[in-house]
Image (spheres, helix red, strand yellow):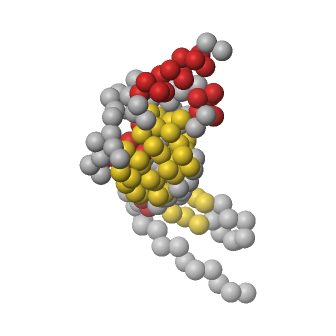
């Protein structure tokens, strides 16, 4: 029978260890907690986002854990915004293509289904194309659907 590799643990560990169960192995793998904290198991990936604004189109690479507005501002785009919380509706856009997670925003489901988004709470879930629109367009639609 093959011998198992020795585990080399410090005699007096200065941090706690975490056991990972592994049914295929006769032993548990042991990793120090600080190591686990530095390992990223979440699936953050970048998507290509086209932003139409002011007569031009800019291509951005936006991580799935950042908003389109945040990346647009970091990239020097002068897009309208205010609260950055999905409340004031100053950053509306038409979602021309792709999909976003905007579950943090205040738009009604009807308005979202019609293809609108607030860029400050729009996290890309795929490559996207958004067109910045006048605030009034979204406000009138939001009010109309609220009366339904
Ligand atoms: S900046 Fe206020 S809703 Fe987006």
Specify the quadrant that holds the N terminus.
bottom right
Q: Is residue 69 above or below residue 106?
A: below
Q: Nearer the viewer, residue 75 or 46?
A: 75
Q: Position of residue 58 (x, y in %)?
A: 37, 54
Q: Position of residue 68 (x, y in %)?
A: 42, 45
Q: Is residue 10 above or below residue 81?
A: below
Query: Is residue 24 in sight in this rendering?
Result: yes
Residue plotted at (56% across, 54% down) = 126
62 lies left or right of 81: right
Residue plotted at (41% across, 47% down) = 52
Q: Is residue 29 above or below residue 134?
A: below
Residue plotted at (61% across, 12% down) = 147
Specify the quadrant that holds the C terminus.
top right
Q: Nearer the viewer, residue 145 or 36?
A: 145
Residue plotted at (41% across, 49% down) = 51
Query: Is residue 36 in sight in this rendering?
Result: no
Q: Position of residue 105 (x, y in %)?
A: 50, 30
């Amino acid at each position: 029978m093959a011998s198992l590799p020795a585990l080399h643990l410090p005699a007096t560990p200065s941090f706690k260890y975490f056991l990972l169960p592994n049914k295929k192995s006769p032993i548990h793998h042991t990793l120090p907690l600080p190591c686990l904290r530095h390992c990223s198991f979440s699936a953050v990936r970048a998507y290509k986002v086209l932003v139409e604004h002011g007569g031009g189109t800019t291509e951005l690479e936006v991580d799935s854990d950042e908003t389109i507005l945040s990346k647009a501002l970091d990239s020097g785009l002068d897009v309208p915004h205010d609260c950055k919380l999905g409340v004031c509706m100053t950053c509306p856009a038409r979602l021309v293509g792709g999909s976003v997670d905007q579950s943090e925003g205040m738009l009604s489901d009807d308005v979202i289904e019609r293809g609108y988004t607030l860029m400050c709470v729009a996290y890309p879930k795929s490559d996207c194309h958004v067109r910045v629109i006048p605030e009034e367009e979204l406000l009138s639609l939001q009010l109309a659907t609220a009366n339904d």
